Image (cartoon, rainbow, N blue to C red):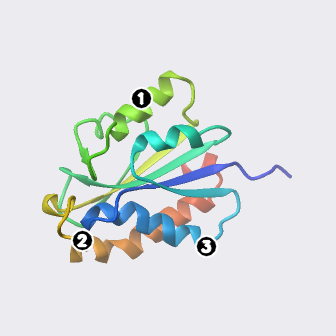
Amino acid sequence: MTAPCSSLLVGLGSPYGDDQIGWCVADAIAGQHLPGLIVRRAGSPLDMFDWLSGVDRLIVCDACQGVGQVGSWHRWCWPSAEIAPLKFGGSHDLGLAAMLSLAEQLGQLPGQVAIWAVEGRAAQFLPPKMTMSPEVEQALPTIIDLIRRESSLPAAIAR
């Protein structure tokens, strides 16, 4: 029997508005203690560099803008030209697509990368509005369940 692969789930975000979706997903899934899954929160995609060593699969969840209606969710496999023009949540110093590209060029990126994003409201990405929009909050249970299911599958099946 082979050991489970090491998967890393990173919830990107902040404590503000719809940008907190990634953190909420990470917190919910971390509480489920799935075997072979490491769960972390990050305020910036750059934070992930230190966590990629020995990881076979990376799953990222973040808020985004520009793909659909507020509260709609999206999933992409890296590399994906679709995510380059998107604005992801918060004011990340290095965007998600740029970080993934850099990690790939440096040979640090896991073989499988999935990006989950929930469309958020532009006005809620920064203070002073501190609560998630009703549409994003309503999407939360679905996105948690979908990412939990993907996280519990062997990497080869989850592609």
Label 3 residue SS: loop
In the image, residue 133 above or below residue 124: below
Which corner quadrant of the image does residue 39 belong to?
bottom right
Of callouts 3 and 2, the N-terminal one: 3
**Is residue 71 in view from this perspective?**
yes
Q: Which residue is disc 2 drawn over?
A: 130
- The amino acid type of the residue labelled 1 equals Ser
Q: Position of residue 126 (x, y in %)?
A: 20, 59
| Residue at left offset 57%, top offset 39% | 50
Q: Which residue is disc 3 drawn over?
A: 32
Q: Position of residue 159 (x, y in %)?
A: 53, 46
| Residue at left offset 68%, top offset 39% | 54
Using the image as rendered, state which of residue 25 and residue 70 is in the foreground: 25
Label 2 residue SS: loop
- In the rendered structure, the answer to whether residue 34 lies left or right of residue 82 reads right
Which corner quadrant of the image does residue 30 belong to?
bottom right
Which corner quadrant of the image does residue 121 belong to?
bottom left
Q: Residues within 10 Å of mark 1 (few under 14, many from 20)?
A: some
Q: Which residue is disc 1 drawn over?
A: 101
| Residue at left offset 45%, top offset 69% | 144
Of callouts 2 and 1, the N-terminal one: 1
